Image: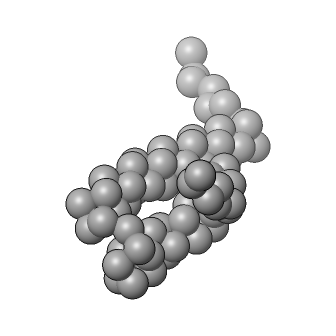
Amino acid sequence: MAVKRRFPPLNDLEGIQHNLQRVFREARRGELDVNEASKLAYILKILADMRMSADFEQRIESLESQTKPLRLAS
């Protein structure tokens, strides 16, 4: 029976970073095939990019909501 391992959640950059570090350590120790580690690292990179994009979008929306709309002279 395979051992079920617990991984940090992937809902923030810190969790993604922890998972990436774990993949690296396991591959380095030979516990995880390097090809599999490469695939997982690529997926984690995509998740990190998506999280950063979502964070930027939230920040932009917050800034836009704090600024007053410009009124054009008629």
Picture coordinates of residue 21, whole percent (x, y): 49, 75
Residue 27 % position (x, y):
36, 75
Say if 17 sits above or below 57 in the image.
below
Residue furthest to the right: 66
State the count of labels.
0
Q: Nearer the viewer, residue 53 or 3?
A: 3
Say which residue appears at 59% left-offset and 52% top-offset.
Answer: 1
- The answer to whether residue 46 shows anywhere in this view is yes
Residue 18, percent from left and from top: 58, 71
Which quadrant does the C terminus fall into?
top right
Q: Is residue 25 left or right of residue 56?
A: left
Q: Is residue 17 visible?
A: no
- Residue furthest out toward the top: 74
Name which residue lies at 57% across and 24% down: 72
Looking at the image, is 71 positioned above or below residue 51?
A: above
Q: Is residue 52 above or below residue 69?
A: below
x 66%, y 50%: residue: 11
